[in-house]
Amino acid sequence: MKTEILTGASQAIDPERIFATPREIKPVQRATLPQEIVKAIADLIRRGVWKTGDLLPSEKDLASQFGVGRSTIREAVKSLAVMGVIESRAGEGSFLRQPSSETLAGAMMWGLLLSERNLDDLLEARILIEVECCSKAAENRSDDVPPRLYRIVEDMKNHFSDYSRFMALDNDFHVLLARSAGNILYSTMAETIQGLVRIWYSATYDMPGTMDLTITEHLRIVDAVRDRNEHAAREAMRAHLSRAGARLKVALG
């Protein structure tokens, strides 16, 4: 079977390169955190166990070999896809992508991702970019943006028992705000950051009150954007991100 990779060339899939052997995939120690899976996959790539164009094992097989739940694998794979490390193809599976210039954001994300020591860097960058995006969204947003944001928050209220869905809606909220700023570079950087958020911040949802606080903080942001109050929008987003960062540090101990 021929498989198209990012370079545009075609190559046959070598069956021996589809799966890493069990001895190469070790159960992770912190199975509730998708970033541990991403780190483990990064290590396999660095050591050449998986190479450009390889078909990764299925979600079920990865969950079994890493010793984690399928939802953890699913979040890790989504994050790797956002970073441009892998490409998911309907009906075929997930393939390791050829590095390219379009993964500018991915290079930044790998650097931030692989060490908890860099969480302060992530938080600082997130505040700089998303606070400005929120202010610009209040200034430039179209009339349909506040209702769409309110709908996302309402959907989040209805998914307290589904961490994966709640987190996806949280990402959607921030991405919509960034796009509403009217600056393509802002929105690109904000979407890049959300790929990291999806990995790290899932750890906070087990903390009592986190989801309620997130809803309350989001509503303050939407109210300011609705009122076209740039200053209030900036401060509401700054407060939300600072508190979310503090919750993450507590969750990670």
Image: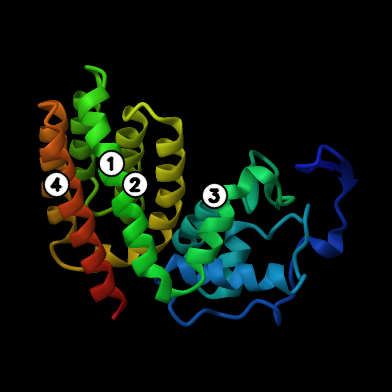
| CA neighbours of label 3 inside 10 A, class few (<14), some (14 to 19), many (20+) | some
Determine whether label 1 and label 4 are within 8 Å by CB.
Answer: no
- For the residues marked 3 and 4, what is the alpha-carbon distance in whole angstroms? 26 Å
Helix, strand or loop at mark 2: helix
Mark in front: 3 vs 2: 2
Determine whether label 2 and label 1 are within 8 Å by CB.
Answer: yes
- For the residues marked 1 and 4, what is the alpha-carbon distance in whole angstroms? 10 Å
Q: Looking at numbered disc 3 in the image, what kind of residue is underneath it?
A: Ala
Viewport quadrant of the C terminus: bottom left
Query: Of the numbered discs in the image, which one, if any, rests on residue 132?
Result: 1
What x and y, as percent, mark residue 178?
34, 36
Which residue in the structure is indicated by mark 4?
235
Which residue in the structure is indicated by mark 2?
129
Viewport quadrant of the N terminus: top right
**Of 41 and 146, which appears nearest the observer?**
146
- Which of the marked residues, 4 or 2, is nearer the chain's N terminus? 2
